[in-house]
Image: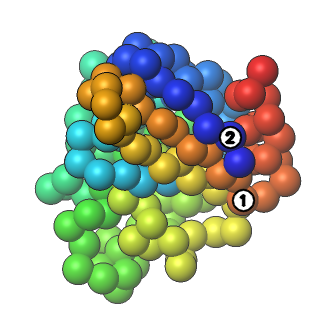
Amino acid sequence: MFEFTSHNENETKEIAFKLASKLERGDIVVLSGDLGSGKTKFTEGFLSYWGLEDEASSPTYTIVNEHKKDDINIYHLDVYRLSDMGEFYAIGGTEYFTNGICVIEWGELIEDILPQNYIKISFSKDENDDSIRYLNFKAYGLRLLSVIEELKR
């Protein structure tokens, strides 16, 4: 486990950019946290690694935003509005897991069907300073554990 303290939106975007630079096809990042805790800003930073930051928007109603850069697909999913995991299966959600890199907001709602290897980032706000966010990274799987270790440096 690794906790990163972000003092502003730029720091949130920087850690996301750094994480994106270390991921490959089939990797999954689950973003968990209350509304306004920084998940979409994180995704902006994540997409900026591929020069796609202007395309970042929360796919709350569309469920998934698909991005392609060179030979990599990046899928930004928001599963908050799904009524159950059956609905995720119905949209072919599990196919995204192997076809590119997935960033899944509210991914804890489908954690039971995620592959064994993924990174979960829990976002929380500081009670005394509205600009501070705490990002708790937890890796599932050896390769992703080494990715998290690299982020600490």
**Total numbered labels:** 2
> What is the number of the mark on residue 2?
2
- Lateral position of residue 98 relative to residue 46, left or right: right
In the depicted structure, whether residue 149 falls above or below residue 55: below
Residue at image point 78% right, 21% down: 153
In the depicted structure, whether residue 79 falls above or below residue 49: below
Specify the amino acid type for callout 1: Tyr
Q: Where is residue 34 in the image (x, y as percent from the top left)?
A: 29, 51
Quarter of the rendering containing residue 107: bottom left
Q: Position of residue 79 (x, y in %)?
A: 31, 63
Q: Residues within 10 Å of mark 2 (few under 14, many from 20)?
A: some
Q: Kindly report which numbered mark, 2 or 1, lies closer to the viewer in this rendering.
A: 2
Query: Which residue position holds label 1?
Result: 140
Residue at image point 38% right, 26% down: 132
- Lateral position of residue 10 relative to residue 147, left or right: left
Specify the amino acid type for callout 2: Phe
